[in-house]
Image (tube, rainbow, N blue to C red):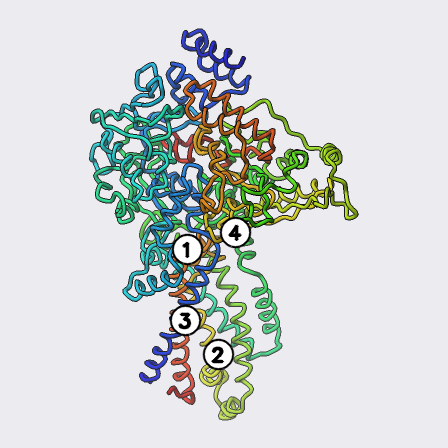
Amino acid sequence: MSQYILRRLMIAIPSLLGISAVLFFVLALAPGDPFSELATNPNVPPEVQAALRAKFGLDDPIYLRYVHWLNAMVHGDWGFSFVSRMNVDTLILQRLPATLYVIGSAQILALLIAIPVGVYAATKPYSLFDQVANTLAFVGFSLPTFFTGILFILIFSVTLDWLPFVYTTDIKGTGIRWVLEMIRQAIMPVAVLGLFQAASMTRFVRSAMLDVIRLDYVTTARAKGLGQATVIVKHVMRNAMIPVVTLIALQMPAVFGGAIVTEQIFRIPGIGSLLITSILSNDTPVVMAVTFVFACLVVLFNLIADVLYGWLDPRISLR
Amino acid sequence: MLDKELRSMIGDVKGGRMDRRAFIQRLAAVGLTAPLANQILALGGVAMAEGVQTYKPTKRGGGGALKLLWWQGPTLLNPHFATGTKDQDGSRLFYEPLACWDPDGNMKLVLAAETPSVQNGLLAADGTSVTWKLKPGVKWHDGKPFSADDVVFTWQYAKDPATAAVTIATYRDLKVDKIDDLTVKITFPQPTPFWADAFVGAGAGQILPKHLFADYIGAKSRDAPANLAPVGTGPYKFLEFKPGDLIRGVINPDYHMANRPHFDSIEMKGGGDAVSAARAVIQTGEYDFGWNIQVEDDVLLRLEKGGKGRTVYATGGDTEFIALNFTDPNVEVDGEKSSIKTKHPLFSDPAVRKALSLLVDRESVKKAIYGRAGRTSANFLNGPEKFVSKNTTWEFSIEKASKMLDDAGWKPGADGIREKDGKKLKIVYQTSINGPRQKTQAIVKQACQKAGIDVELKSVVASVFFSSDVANPDTYPKFYADIEMFQIPLSQPDPSQHMRRYLSTLVASKENKWQGTNFPRWVNKDYDAAINAADREMDPIKRAALYVKANDLMWEDTVFITVMHRLKVEAAANTLRPVISGWANETDNLFDWYREE
């Protein structure tokens, strides 16, 4: 087992190197300039822009810049943002709590809805409950978050005036008031994201369950006289969860990576909004760091999913 | 004639026969008012007016929290590194200049004790130096006294090329000397009619504390801890900064202006987009003030109905224009298109340029897009009023344009597109990606088609369009299109920097890596002469006349087709009394903001 993990980690190194190289070169080839805004300011002579480009090494050949970046990254130096001149790691750490809180809650909400609904729907396929759940799930994942987000704002903020639609990180008040405010301002973004995730996950759980529920060993278990609850939870669910675990594991990096659209709509200062503003302002070091961390997380969670398979289904052996 | 009239009026003001207000109104009548009218008076020997006092609160604090929404949040808080106005706005919450501009373009004193004028002897009559007296007893937020050393240091800091300050252009050519602890003298290398650039306004004027930045001048400039945690002299003390997201500050109880500031704390939130920012201020009232609400007027009018806020406008000199390329964008000479060695095949005929100008329906653009945030104008230079030409006109007429083209020999071909000598009237029209700009493109294209001109529209992502990337063909300085549309903000109440860009010597080319600022590649000796003369002209009336002439030359040659004179649009809560100037950053007059209950 430990040998397996070690081997997987070793394989991860070349793939991460490859990912970083592709990311870096694509970003370097992308058009734009972090100092473009200066060009429209008549007070700033063009030499300043040129001097800044030279100072930040933007005029070096691409491969040299990549080597510099890689070397610094290996030494734990993530570089600094061209736009805010702040260290990239501080910038990311600043944004992480909001993303973990909002996106994490949304994922939990999605699981809390998807698993019970999916399982129950699968036990009674084509019943009224199943039909309703299916229809809602279909509607849910057909509506993009930028639409439901604005719809929620119009209903709950503008018309009803119940919830704030601008997420703030400095809530006044302490103790229980602070907690309540934190929950209040997160309701809309969490609901928007959570329901969207829940919709597709519900369908996934349901079909995974249906695949297993027809198998002979389930019939055997029932014939032994086991109760419905035991059969479903102990015998069916555990096996049905294998594909679901993969799905969840692949969703986990997103919890760290943020949700670009939702964060932008609700002004959540998370990783997603950091990424999009950095992309728009051509802030390469930040884009590089965020995407690279994201790539590392994908690799890591894939490994975790594989390890979990072995625990869920002992027939899968890891060598 | 104008000359004489102005001169006698200045005499009247000096002699007390005419009051300042009447003078400005008279100037307005002849097309010369606002910000620089006051500088005219200053140079004419009458002291510059103090801005009108609108501030009502009678005690410091008590206004609660002020919540500002900047949909592009500031990303750094050193004003001399500001990549955009958003960063200047954020820094200005804490740092201060010697003086700033009020909504009428009058100078308002901040850290200075007296407005320089020829009369009080602080301004040299020949415009080669200006002396500033500093307010005594001002303290930095950390308790250290503010003095002339800080002013001199800011100059040294910004002019050092290794610092790579964006304000270098303001400071590199002048000399700043400390006379005593509360007096500094700025010496200019040549007569400088507009002497109020250095240390004035939020753009370049914010003064840094020497004791915190002295060790971080030059190449080490990025390492200064104070870059992210400013210690200023302003009305609010710094608490917290998250780039692109949030700035928080708290009232400065030792602020040097009486009864100010009104608010106990301040918060500047970033992120999102203009429409939802307008909504958060006008419709739901979650925020008190929303910055730069570039939203279609229809939407704003709808939000304002029964809302909790309103829009606020400020007039400056921002002009949205269509620039015409005087060189050929389709022929490559020595590895560069739009080379100055070529002539534009279509636009070398003045009739085509004039016809194009007749085909821009400014009134429709205003109605359909800019609404209250725009004014139609024929001029490229739309402010300060004193410099605005009254000799120009514009009109929209497809018939006249068609006739003009007919007369010049451009006849419609079989496909309806006009042609002459085998050259078809087909043009490429580029701009940055931005809702109002794409709509304007559509309006212009429609009119052109009716007149037999085929227009191909091209939209480039703003970060590319405005970049200096030498390798990219789609930047505005490269101008690989026939016409292009955008705006260059006029960031101070003086046109000199703005108009200098179009000197013949500054044509953008491969040789200067397209850093030349004359992107239309228009060459006109009379224009060069007028601008160079204006740069040294100390007589304010003659100087204004030179800029008017320069503008008129551009108009006659149809270098720029003005689409709209744009106003600043902000959103404010109904109870908030913000002071916004079209000549300054939004936060430049923040100390005068208050809330009316």
As measured in the structure, the alpha-carbon distance from the residue carrying label 3 to the one carrying label 1 is 24 Å
Three-letter code, disc 3: Gly
Picture coordinates of residue B279 (x, y %)?
51, 44
Kind of element beneath mark 3: helix
Residue bearing the label numbered 4: B335
Residues at discs 4 and 1 in contact (Cβ within 8 Å): no
Q: Does the rendering let one see residue A108?
A: no
At which x and y percent is residue B570? 49, 37
- Looking at the image, residue A53 sits to the left or right of residue B405; the answer is left
Pointer 2: what residue? A243
Q: Position of residue B210 (x, y in %)?
A: 23, 37
| Label 3 chain ID | A
In the displayed image of the protein, which residue is found farthest to the right? Answer: B414
Q: How far is the residue under mark 4 from the one under mark 1?
A: 39 Å
The amino acid at mark 4 is Gly
Q: Point out the tag, 2 or 1, that comes first from the N-terminus.
A: 2
Tag in front: 3 or 2: 3
Question: In the structure shown, which secondary structural element does the residue marked by tag 4 occupy?
Answer: loop
Mark toward the viewer: 3 or 1: 3
Q: Tell me the quarter of the image containing the N terminus of chain A.
A: bottom left
Identity, as a three-letter code, of the amino acid under mark 2: Pro
Instruction: For marks 2 and 1, give the CA distance.
Output: 32 Å
Pointers 4 and 2 in contact (C-beta within 8 Å): no
